Image: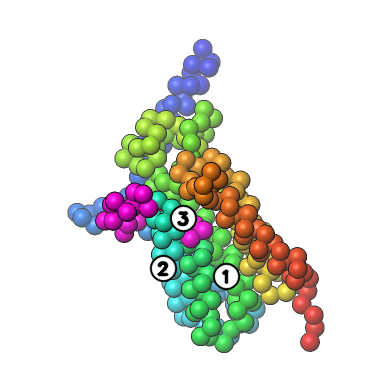
Amino acid sequence: MCYTLAAARLELNRSKLRNTLSPVIVQIGPLALRWYGLMYVTAVLVGVWLATREAERKKLPITPDEIMNFGLVVMFAGILGGRIYYVIFNWDFYGQNLWEIPQLWNGGLAIHGGLVGGVLAGFIYLRRHPVPTFSFADAVAPSIMLGQVFGRFGNFMNGDAHGVPTNLPWGVVFPAASIAGRQYPGMAIHPVMLYELALNLVWFLILRRLRLTHHKPGYIFCLYFVLYSIGRAAVSGFRADSLWFGPVRAAYVASAALILIFGGVIVAKRLWEAEPAR
């Protein structure tokens, strides 16, 4: 009897949540404010504010306006890189449906492609400004991690970057119109977006704390890639929409490569140590 009541209560809660989840916040005629877009804007604004404060604390020669421009450049380059990466790994579909490529509101951004695009654009931008590149990268890295927290909430409301079915009590049934709902109609699935959101929030707090320690330039930036890659690898096994590199999830390959590269730089350069006095 108790089990039956608990199951009924769980199903009621899931039904309420399913009815609450929507990619659209408000719509007026053809115009819609979507969670996906709002989270990107919020990530940039909050990230720029934090990066500006950190640059001021470190006395870096860069203005708030330049940091805002940097944030916008990195955001758009990240979106472009993430979309290109995703389309390449799903070319069997997009090659036959070219009009789907620009439809970002349907999901389909790969974070590893976004990182490549954003980092490349960021370094190109910084070459035109007299600011120590890796010191500024350290100032920005926590903001990037926090931005991914906002991004995963956008994924949750959008019903993409979703998980596989589960019988666990915190499984979520997504609306039938969402990507997750279309793949698993009426089925509870892992809210893997929230798993990664929680991990990214923990990593953000760690990076924010470590930025106050004495270390060589580039330590926080490199540690960002190591921590994020550990978290992404940990949750990828629950993802239903993983990209594949042959028989292996592409996220595992990319995460392993990033851990080896940036972890290797940290160890080889002993970046955690205080910078020698000059």
User: In this figure, which residue is indicated by the disc labeled 1?
Assistant: 140
Q: 64 or 183, which lies in front? A: 183
Residue closest to the far front: 246
User: Which amino acid type corresponds to the residue marked 1 in the rendered image?
Assistant: Val
Q: How many numbered circles are shown?
A: 3
Task: Determine the image quadrant of residue 77.
Answer: bottom left
Q: In front of the other: label 3 or label 2? A: 3
- Judge from the rendering whether residue 5 lies leftward or rightward of residue 208; answer left or right: left
| Amino acid identity at mark 3 | Ala
Q: Residue at x 50, y 78 (%)?
A: 124
Whether residue 201 is in magenta: the answer is no
Q: Earlier in the sequence, mark 3 or mark 2?
A: 2
* Distance (Cα) linking label 1 and label 3: 21 Å
Residue found at x 24% / y 57%: 31
Q: Which residue is mark 3?
A: 110
Tag 1's secondary structure? helix
Q: Nearer the viewer, residue 149 or 165?
A: 165
List x then y, in percent, for residue 211. 68, 68
The residues colored magenta run 91-113
Q: What residue did someone put label 2 on?
A: 76
Foreground mark, 1 or 3, reads 3
Coloration mode: rainbow
Instruction: Identify the image quadrant of the C terminus.
Output: bottom right
x, y percent for residue 264: 71, 64
Question: Quick check: 95 above or below 213?
Answer: above
